[in-house]
Amino acid sequence: MRHRFHAVKIYALVGVVSLAALSLLILPGWEAPGPFPSKFWNALAAFAILGIVCDSFSSRLPFAKVSTSVGFIPLIASVPLFRHPWPMLVAGITALVVESLVRHKPAVRVWFNTAQYMLATGLGALVYVSLGGVVSSDVFDFALIPFAALVFTFFIVNQGSVALAVSMSSDVSLGEAWDRIGKDTIATDALSSTLAILLVFLYAKLQLLGIAILIFPLFLVRQLYQMNQQLQEELEEKLELMVKAMEARDPYTSGHSRRVSEYALAIARELRLPARDLDGIKRAALLHDVGKIYEEFAPLLRKEGKLTAEEMMTMRTHVTRSAQLVATATRLRGDVEAMIRHHHENFDGTGYPEGLAGDQIPMGARIIMVADTIDAMTTDRPYRRAMSLARAVEELEKYAGRQFDPDLVRLVAKSGSIRRLLGLDRRFPESDAESSRATRPAWAQRIAH
């Protein structure tokens, strides 16, 4: 039912974007291009081919299967060169060919991306002309304000419509989708847009030769996009390797860090935190126990009985050891490091390592504390069976205000995302409630680790 609801919203969005693009396409003011073949048709074909080539060599953002490319450069450049509706048609041909023949997308995505490309280009052209921008393929007459407005309009419509589609087809908020699609590439996109000015200039002066001259710079910009993506992927892979190395020491925590990361991300999303904060919380949750990789913790992790007071003190140092290890990576210093250091601080100030309380504890650390506890209670352990989600929530509520942030406990109690991650509570039979109740001190001791 939930997937069907998402599908209905997506088809409605496709319909609205398509209708808007069609309405813009049939506006009066079409300019007769003259007979075929001619200079005009050669130029139009060249820009369509250039758009297809640029858009074909794309890189995948690590989010919702969204791709990014430098295909927007020839589309933006076509606006000062060709009158309505030809830039829209160049955009439509580019998207249709690339989405269907190169990326082999489903029909609905081909339709949507074709429509939104045409709409973004058409609205950008309308704004450009309204602000006094000159349209000519023979004379280069650059004006900053109309061109800047064209670029701004194109990206607002293009990235905004894609973000809206992602939000409608998932549990991701529109704000997060917008941040992830546009925020990470905004500087590169703005810089790359200046190549559209150069493309207009070169075409006005050199015609088709000007397009050929710009192919190599376009290739370099495309490589810049790809390098940024590769750096991001390499960081995530290194984080995964660190977690796997740590979990290899303790078979009972296999998968624990990844589950805690998923629960923490779900909680943070329900709080509508910005995408940058979500990424930090996800990484901190993934690495919250990474300090246990040190040899001093190995015998303690394998010990099945209760830890002695001295062993407990040693185990508690894992938060600072984890924070110190994470701080060796420049991109993880600061917020991520602090979340890891303080994820065992109790809300009433009785936790460790510094006894912080309430709002003194970073929000990410409070979230990880709750997520860590949820996984500890809802996962089978050698000393007890997994609790049901209902029992786990009871335990969270019992210690709300003491160990846990009460606002987060209330959020988790009604969270649909957490229930979905836990398989809608089907894994945990309610008949285990009594045995779970009897073993509460055991989970509490393990969480203290």
Image: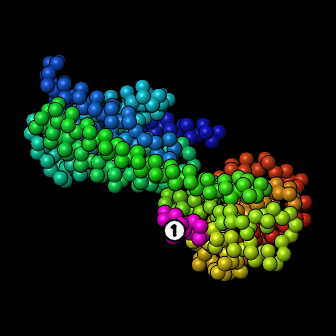
Q: Between residue 320 and residue 391, name the one nearer to us.
A: 320
Q: Which residue in the protein does label 1 denote?
A: 333
Q: Between residue 80 and residue 414, name the one nearer to us.
A: 80
Residue at the outermost left position: 139
Considering only vertical position in the picture, is 231 above or below 268? above
Predominant secondary structure, magenta span? helix
User: Does residue 331 belong to the magenta stretch?
Assistant: yes
Residue at the outermost front position: 295
Q: Residue at x 76, y 50 (%)?
A: 425
Q: Position of residue 158 (x, y in %)?
A: 37, 44
Q: Quadrant of the N terminus?
A: top right
Q: How many marks?
A: 1
Q: Position of residue 217 (x, y in %)?
A: 26, 42
First to last magenta residue range: 323-337
Residue 175 is at least partly visible in this image = yes
Dot 1: element: loop
Considering only vertical position in the picture, is 29 above or below 353? above
Q: Residue at x 54, y 62 (%)?
A: 280
